[in-house]
Amino acid sequence: MGGVSWRSLVRSEVQRLAGYVPGEQPRDRGYVKLNTNENPYPPSPRVLEAIRAAANADLRLYPDPSATELRAKAGEVYGFAPDFILAGNGSDELLSIVLRSCAGPGDRVVYPTPTYSLYETLVAIQGAKTVAVPFPSDFRLPVDGLGEQGQVLTIVCNPNAPSGTLAPVSAIEEIARRVRGLLVVDEAYVDFASDSALPLVHRYGNVLVLRTFSKSFSLCGMRIGLAFGHPDLLAELAKVKDSYNIGRLGLVAAAAALDDRAYMEANAARVRATRAVLASGLSNLGFDVLPSETNFVLARRPGEDLAPLQRRLKERGVLVRYFAVPGLRDAVRITVGTPEEVRSLIAALGS
Ligand SMILES: *Cc1c(COP(=O)(O)O)cnc(C)c1O
């Protein structure tokens, strides 16, 4: 190609990017798949029925760009007027919209680490600057470190990934009071937890809470998320989203999922029960296990690199997540599967 280097076609911020690395989705054989926090239970039968019913000739038409029915339903369920809600193509898209809307070159974005590594990627794409505030070893939220320091955006994943730990809402509220910029609370795992920051949206104009249908509603494959925030803020964010960001089937699936919350809640209860079994099994095997309020646990052997353990488990047909980053090399993150899957994992660890 006429002497032009492909690299020169791309912004330097993107060239420098390592790129977000999702957990593996192997196709080579069947695995006990405990590496990407998918729900082990299928979506509600009512959701599947709604998707099938919507798979018709209307697919030639664009979907509703403002997700009117879904937002109305979510508003009823969670106690908000629909204009407090923005729907996204998964909460990953909502995060991307927030970063593109709020963070320009050189702007500071503050969050505690280790956490969801996509934040760093999205900040880097903007040419903005990550200010990483380390969690202490017990993963208590470092509220003082997250306070006002000229940042445009503060992100708290709560419960946090990959630690699984939940910060009290009072700590989140303290940050909302202290910072001038936007505070995003990523609540991807909140349905497995005992508390939520959602009520703060009623009281603080600078708080945006993100939810997803991926984890608790078993709909990773559909890509639907919701943001809850002040209507004036959401009106700005809406300018940045793709017009037709959720397909017709996704809109229908999410609305049907909200109509069958009892199904989701029953699965979340099963996951919590299995989580306790998994945690005690891991403790018995000599792992340090942080108290989890999610559908995964972080199992640590302080000072020991667990990469070989992760590889050994894979050979035995069990996938868990290992993060080759400082502070996490002595840990593996294990998704709570079915009781049978957890038994397989514990057996593979013990053998
Ligand atoms: C899974 C996850 C998301 C992404 O959710 P999607 O709706 O599937 O995009 C966002 N944040 C955290 C912390 C997650 O674990």
Image (cartoon, grey):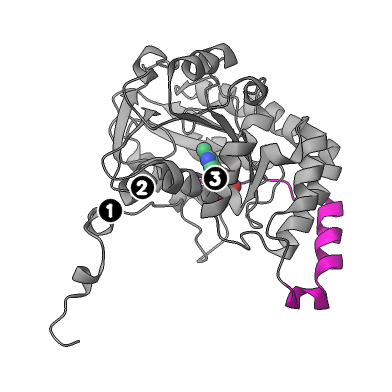
Q: Which residues are magenta?
A: 34-61
Relative image position of residue 67 (x, y in whole percent): 72, 54
Instruction: Tell me residue 190's x, y (percent).
Output: 64, 30
Q: Is residue 329 above or below residue 180?
A: below
Q: Measure how far apart labels 3 and 1 are at the Cα level.
A: 27 Å
Q: Which residue is most to the left?
A: 3
Which amino acid does the dot numbered 3 rest on? Glu
Sequence-wise, which precedes: disc 2 or disc 1?
A: 1
Residue tagged 1: 17
- Kindly check if marks 2 and 1 are in contact, taking CB atoms under 8 A apart as contact: yes
> Which residue carries the number 2 mark?
121
Task: Describe the element under mark 3 as helix, strand or loop.
Answer: helix
Q: Is residue 120 left or right of residue 41?
A: left
98 versus 66 height, above or below: above
Residue 234 placement, left or right of 252: left
Q: Which residue is identified by label 3?
A: 236
Q: Secondary structure at mark 1?
A: loop
Depth order, front residue of 341/227 = 227
